[in-house]
Image: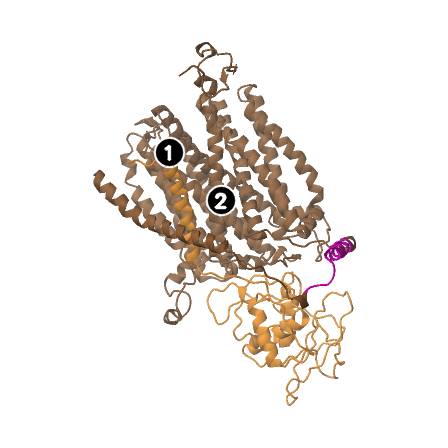
Chain colours: A brown, B orange
Amino acid sequence: MNGAMNRKLLFVLGPVTGVVMFVGVVMIATFLTNREYREPYRAPAAAVDATPRVAGLADERAEAETNARTKIYEEAEYRTFPVVGSRVAIWAVAQLHLLFAAFVLAVPLFAFIIEVIGYKTGDLRYDRLAHEFTRLLSVSFSLTATFGAFLTFMLIALYPKFTNYLMSVFSPTFLPYVLLFFAEAFFLYTYYYGWGKFHPRVHLALGLGLNLVGTAIMFIANAWLTFMMSPRGVSETGAVISVWDAVYNFTWMPINVHRVIANIAFGGSVAAAYAAFKFLTAESDEERAHYDWMGYIGNFVAISAFLPLPFAGYWLASEIYAYSQTLGLQMMGGAFSWLFIIQAVLIGNLFLAANYYLWLGMGRVEGVQPLQKFIKYLLIGIALCFMVWATPRSIIATVSEVRAMGGSAHPVLGFLGVMSAKNTAVNILILTTFMSFLLYRRTGKIAAVAWAKAGHAAQLAIFAGVAIFVIFLGVYGYFVEASVRIGLSVPQVTSVLFAMVSITAIDVFLFRGAKRTGEVRWGRIPAISQYVLIFIAVTFTWLMGLMGYVRSGLRQHWHVYGVIRDTSADAFTPTLGFATQVVSVTVLMFFVLIGVVFWITSLHERAEYRALVPSPEKVPHTGADMVLDGARLSAEPRGAD
Amino acid sequence: MTIPVGPRIGALVLATTAFYGYVGQMVPQNEVQPPAEILIRADLTTPEMVEIGRDITTGKGLCRTCHTLGQTGALRFPDLDGVAVRAQSRVPGLSEVEYFAQSLYEPDRFIVPGFNPGMPTINRPPIGLTDQEILCVIAYLQSLGGTPTVTLQTAHPYYTPPAAAPPAPGTAPGEPPAQGAAPGAAPPAAAPPAPGAAPVVPPPQGTAPGTAPAPAAGTVTP
């Protein structure tokens, strides 16, 4: 075995040594050649300036001083960032700021809810869990603020004229923003450090304050960025008419709602990834059980928020269309249309991974077999919906293929690439994932109420009825005019929401006092489930990066759409390939930083340093060592050898 | 040999981001440049205007983002194929040029039945075409099923060329030149609107100037 290994090693080392030697020879040769003696260059006598050197230098200095005195002040419109350029630099910093901000806003939301559950039920596990989530906050808060300051300085330095314009419009919002930031710091640190130090109601009030202030901060910042996309309250030349109208622009409230929900989904997934990391590095069954539960709760929060997210997305898109059909069509049918195919791949993966995690999680519960037979049907449904959603309307094809198809749309598959099919697919996808949740919820339980049979039948009827209705509307959309078809997405969405709310309501009463057939064995889940949680977190983060790009990139060559034009070298809209590269790099940077956050957070679990060294009595006193408060300052105790 | 958890997680994160980055390379790669400034010479001929108009509809004008050409079925916005023929009788009282001008300067005045309002005002930001660029677009639209007639000297209710001659007696504003006129001859111009006045509502053909226009059949007012 060792011999074979050594031969393999030699096989690899041989070429590597050869390459290293070759590079070494080239470097030595270059070094020697560069230092070879050469005759110094001497200007021909006729070309030599007759001016004495000292006088010439004095003239140069005088000229430089004169130029410096008379230099005219010019306001820079743009400045360039080295290597990657201004746009990519701002893009990456803004994205990192937003990701950390989303995390810092989301975690207190569900930590507060979990703490409320703990307070109401008296179950201390919830209180511990909420506290553990909150531990991730303080370092993240510092990073958010640092990236926020970084972004502001970058904007001032790289886009001074545009930043100056935004400041002139929104200056009345700055003071409230700063004051709210102070308030958030107060609430966050008292909420975290005051855990267990106040009456539970006082502590909950601090948590509520933290959430209210954090949300208000986000709403103010959202006004700035949504104004850039759908400006209002300014004249055609950009003069401010109404600051409130500038704040309350077309896309402000849809973005507010969309971001609150998306932040919860994202925060839940990152917190679940933290739990997964802790599960994988846990050394005892007790730890594994705790972090399995924490990961489950984090993922539950993420997917629960993820399910209504497309509805908030519909609202945002409809407001974009209402503001400007051109902007809406650029998004869905123009330069960014292919981006939504990438989005479909991401969301399809999220749905698949979330369902897979739930199905793996069923193994924790005894007596799960009767429900597992349904999983294959759910998987088929999800796969079909995923395929429809990822079908492009126009296919990338050669000229001859386009001729053969009679156009860029495939004669059969092309029908699946339109909004009627895609809306139907995503609604069925949501319904299917909801069913997975429902199955998971009832594993190990049997309804004991008298009306159990009728309850199950009602749930099934609602589910089937809504699924048929959604599919019917999708098919009907092919046969009606555009003005009617666009409106069909509203009853589709409403019926799915109705199904989710009504089926959950029935389920709550149906399983009240249910008979248990098996206990949940937390920690008894395959390790791969934890990698699924990490995959979900990465996918969520990447999705946020991508959708942040489309929201911002939609303005194309405008800083403020239709008002302030981008005249910089970066005014063009990059290819989707380039955009996805920037998103990928930013996501990697985020995960490196969040890894640091996890590491710093886990430091509190380490044994204290003074506990690792011998107590003062055990250290031989030589008169040279200093022992203060149990901490040894010298590297090795003298005399220890 | 067991790979530690840290490198495994790192590899998973790297592989996932690399996969999504790869998916991003698989879709069509288009770099969209800001619309180039269009140089419109004063001596452009109508065929040249048609060419420029075509470029504007696919570029700066963003027309083709919404409007298709030669497609049928459940469309979101009207198809432009043969639009010149339909424009002649789309709104009673409006000539082809007047209808096109109204659609571009005041798009919500008439909505084609079966479609929703959504057309932006073309001479205002963010599209912001100049009057001359709009004339080129009209020339191109005329070429879609008809014969282009407009020149840079063509007047319509929303625009009067700087050196336009007063309308010839008995000729309606925007009316194409009489048969037999020399190619490229300037049609008669309408009276310029007062500075700062609201866009002039084009009067139906045959209406005396200054008479309030009767609402056209099928007109949707915002």
Range shown magenta: A48-66
Q: Residue at x 35, y 49 (%)?
A: A383
Task: Report which quarter residue B205 is drawn in.
Answer: bottom right
Q: Chain of mark 2?
A: A
A3 left or right, relative to A159: left
Q: Secondary structure at mark 1?
A: helix
Q: Which residue is mark 1?
A: A441
For label 1, count other residues whose C-alpha is less than 10 Å away and answer few (under 14), some (14-19) or many (20+): some
The image position of residue A229, as x and y in percent, is 61, 52
Q: CA distance from mark 2 to mark 1?
A: 21 Å
Viewer-side residue, B151 vs A191: A191
Left or right, A547 with reference to A378: right
Q: Amino acid at mark 1?
A: Arg
Q: Quadrant of the N terminus of chain B?
A: top left
- Residue position marked by numbered label 2 in the rendering: A309
Looking at the image, tell me whether mark 2 or mark 1 is earlier in sequence order: 2
Q: Left or right? Give the position of A113 relative to B194.
A: left
Q: Amino acid at mark 2?
A: Leu
